[in-house]
Image: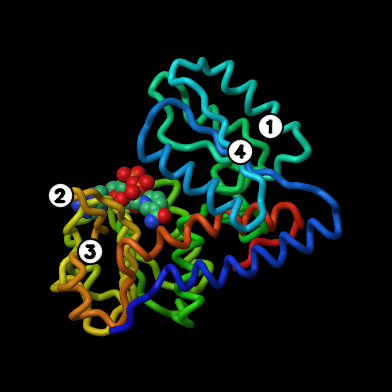
Amino acid sequence: MQLLNGKEVAAFHRERVERRLADIQEELHIQPELAIILVGEDAPSAMYAKSMQKTARSVGLKAEIYQEPASISEVELLSLMDRLNEQASVFGILPMMPLPRHLNSQRIIDCIDPKKDVDGLTDVNIAHLYTGRPGFVPCTPRAVIAILDYYHISLSGKDVAIIGRSNVVGKPLAQLCLNCNATVTHCHTRTKDLKAVCRRADLVIAAAGKAGLVTGDMIKPGAVVIDVGINRVDGKTVGDVVFDEVAAQAGAVTPVPGGVGAVTTMMVLENVVCGIARTETIL
Ligand code: NAD
């Protein structure tokens, strides 16, 4: 069984990001900024924002957290977004989700300039992903593909089972797998026989946010398993996969922590750098 080490994949991409950023700074004489928008006190969002800022700064990218009170009105938040859209030094805008309930997330997303939408959330970038045109691809699905690429695991002709159909993870992931010529079965809470679907798959990608969902008996011997899930159980961070059981069956598996999550942050930065250079995303 091969452990698919997200930290190693992230280190590989870090080097590319640093190199590109240095080239851009030399050529264009700019100090590009990633704007991270954090509204309220949601602890996981605050942690993610801080870690994103730290990693961005460590590769030489300016990263500012715009911390706004939970009581901010939609008009005020939209006006901040407008300012960042207009600000030439800002090349990426990343709103932390979830937003407080009185704010309409979709309206906030809709107002991000698609050219600064580094997590591929806007309709324009989603449409580009679906029609195969260049654009920003959501970072977690990109991280999954980056791991597979790094380990030379081809998707072409493979049966892939994806568990989870959210707009930010499951759905774009299914499209990316399809773009890589996989045969995709998309599973969710209403899927009748999840075990049977997974058991047929050459690659199982779990993105449900349910600890213990994927057990060893759901995995075909030798299959690849990517665990996107992040759950807190008894003070520990675990994925959706029962790691020891699945590792005994699988040919390769990502750990949690140290798997997809480790690569996701780097994908955001890679998107920022690609956006500055106006190049296609490095996939
Ligand atoms: P979500 O709650 O929006 O969507 C979960 C999806 O899983 C839904 O479509 C639901 O139908 C499906 N699902 C839930 N329980 C299921 C079950 N028992 N059987 C079959 N399908 C089931 O979550 P999300 O934002 O897509 O995130 C999914 C997981 O990935 C979460 O644990 C989240 O924390 C994690 N995540 C990780 C990263 C990373 O970088 N590693 C990034 C984003 C999200």
Judging by the rendered image, the residue that carries numbered circle 2 is 234
Indicate which disc, 4 or 1, sits on the residue closer to the N terminus: 4
Residue at horizontal 25%, vertical 79%?
250
Mark 2–mark 3 CB contact (< 8 Å) = no
Helix, strand or loop at label 1? It is helix
Give the CA distance from mark 2 to mark 3.
16 Å
Judged by depth in the image, the label closer to the viewer, 1 or 3, is 1
Q: Is residue 165 visible?
A: no
Give the CA distance from mark 4 to mark 1.
11 Å
The kind of residue tagged 4 is Glu
Mark 2–mark 1 CB contact (< 8 Å) = no
Identify the image quadrant of the C terminus: bottom right
Left or right relative to 175: residue 277: right
Residue at horizontal 18%, vertical 65%?
242
Judged by depth in the image, the label closer to the viewer, 2 or 1, is 2
The kind of residue tagged 1 is Leu
User: Percent from the top left, x then y, of residue 205?
Assistant: 33, 65
Give the CA distance from mark 2 to mark 1.
40 Å
Q: Is residue 77 above or below residue 275?
A: above
Q: Is residue 99 above or below residue 227?
A: above
User: Percent from the top left, x then y, of residue 142?
Assistant: 51, 61
Give the CA distance from mark 3 to mark 4.
35 Å
Q: Which mark is residue 84?
A: 1
**Residue placed most toward the observer, 210 or 201:** 210
Q: Is residue 89 visible?
A: yes
Q: Which mark is residue 64?
A: 4
Question: Is the residue marked by circle 3 packed among few (<14), some (14-19), or many (20+) residues within 10 Å?
Answer: many
Q: Which mark is residue 241?
A: 3
Helix, strand or loop at label 4? It is strand
